[in-house]
């Protein structure tokens, strides 16, 4: 039985990971979360040890003895980063740096697993990004996540720091914050509100259920793999227009929508190749978005 430190464990994806670990293993978990608007104690299924603290301020004495750190904590809303990038630099860059420095002081550390995003690859044209591709971020959000990735990798190169990085496509699932795309669309159509759609709505995103992501992350964490990057995706991709129509059809409602000025620096398409993961661990569990929507909405 190991002890896992989970930063951002009260957020959407972090809490899905904590719940998966708590329900399927005997590992001990300590959550570090400053409980911003995106975090919620009610996301947890089982009581779990929790320390309310900003990852920029964590010190080794806060954590006690532990074996692993999984770093979910991050500012993640792209629109917010366009309005004000400073909180993203603080949390995603300075916070990750601090957690690396804290972890380096643990002589018994087995692995530091850093959660990144497909957005670091930037706009993808016709292919699917592989882990060795250049990273070309387009927003302050993705730029700070790319910066965090490089801090983790440089610690591996300089100090022999044992790390893994996962780059994941768009997550969906229970308890997602209402500001995110799918919950916002469901709520707007249910209420008969007009749905604002950036640009022409033909932006393509790849989707994974947060539980499937959590399972893949735990598989990597407990593996012998170290100092590697793994894409975690499903190949299940839709345009924003298709998602809106899908939700409207399930609700049996005509959708009121309006195309609005596109987001600044908006990437047209993201797509991941997850062959590296699948060749090592097999095809990952894949909840189908359409089936999940039908279950949740009805």
Image (cartoon, grey):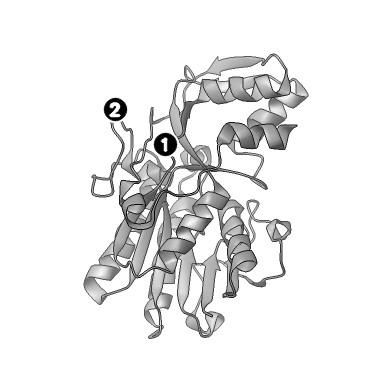
Q: Classify residue 226 by image quadrant.
A: bottom left
Whether residue 34 is visible = no
Q: Classify residue 205 by image quadrant.
A: top left
Task: Tally the numbered discs.
Answer: 2
Residue visible at 36% across and 47% down?
143
Residue position marked by numbered label 2 in the rendering = 126
Q: Nearer the viewer, residue 235 or 112?
A: 235
Residue visible at 39% across and 77% down?
110
Q: From the viewer's perspective, is 140 left or right of 132? A: right
The disc placed on residue 235 is 1
Measured as percent of width and height from the top left, residue 85 is found at 45, 46
Q: Secondary structure at mark 1?
A: loop
Q: From the viewer's perspective, is 115 left or right of 123? A: right
Residue visible at 26% across and 75% down?
160
Q: Is residue 87 above or below residue 110?
A: above
| Earlier-in-chain disc, 2 versus 1 | 2
Q: From the viewer's perspective, is 186 left or right of 147? A: right
- Pointer 2 and pointer 1: residues touching (CB < 8 Å)? no
Measured as percent of width and height from the top left, residue 228 is found at 30, 61
């Amino acid at each position: 039985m190991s002890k896992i430190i989970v930063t951002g464990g009260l957020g959407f994806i972090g809490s899905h990971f904590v719940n998966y670990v708590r329900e399927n293993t005997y590992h001990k978990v300590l959550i570090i979360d400053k409980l911003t608007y995106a975090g919620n104690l009610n996301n947890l299924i089982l009581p779990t040890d929790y320390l309310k603290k900003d990852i920029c301020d964590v010190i080794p004495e806060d954590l006690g003895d532990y074996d692993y750190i999984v770093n979910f904590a991050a500012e993640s809303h792209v629109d917010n980063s366009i309005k004000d990038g400073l909180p993203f630099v603080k949390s995603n860059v300075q916070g990750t740096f601090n957690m690396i420095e804290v972890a380096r002081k643990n002589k018994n550390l087995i692995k530091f697993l850093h959660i990144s995003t497909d957005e670091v690859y930037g706009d993808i044209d016709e292919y699917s990004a592989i882990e060795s591709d250049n990273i070309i971020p387009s927003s302050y959000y993705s730029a700070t996540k790319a910066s965090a990735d490089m801090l983790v990798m440089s610690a591996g190169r300089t100090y022999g720091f044992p790390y893994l990085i996962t780059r994941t496509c768009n997550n969906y699932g229970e308890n997602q914050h209402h500001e995110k795309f799918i919950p916002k669309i469901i709520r707007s159509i249910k209420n008969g509100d007009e749905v604002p759609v950036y640009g022409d709505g033909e932006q393509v995103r790849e989707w994974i259920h947060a539980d499937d992501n959590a399972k893949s992350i735990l598989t990597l964490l407990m593996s012998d793999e170290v100092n590697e990057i793994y894409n975690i995706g499903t190949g299940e991709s839709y345009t924003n227009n298709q998602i809106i129509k899908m939700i409207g059809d399930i609700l049996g409602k005509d959708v009121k929508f309006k195309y609005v000025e596109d987001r600044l620096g908006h990437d047209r398409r993201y797509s991941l190749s997850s062959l590296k993961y699948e060749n090592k661990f097999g095809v990952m569990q894949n909840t189908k978005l359409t089936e999940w929507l039908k279950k949740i909405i009805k």
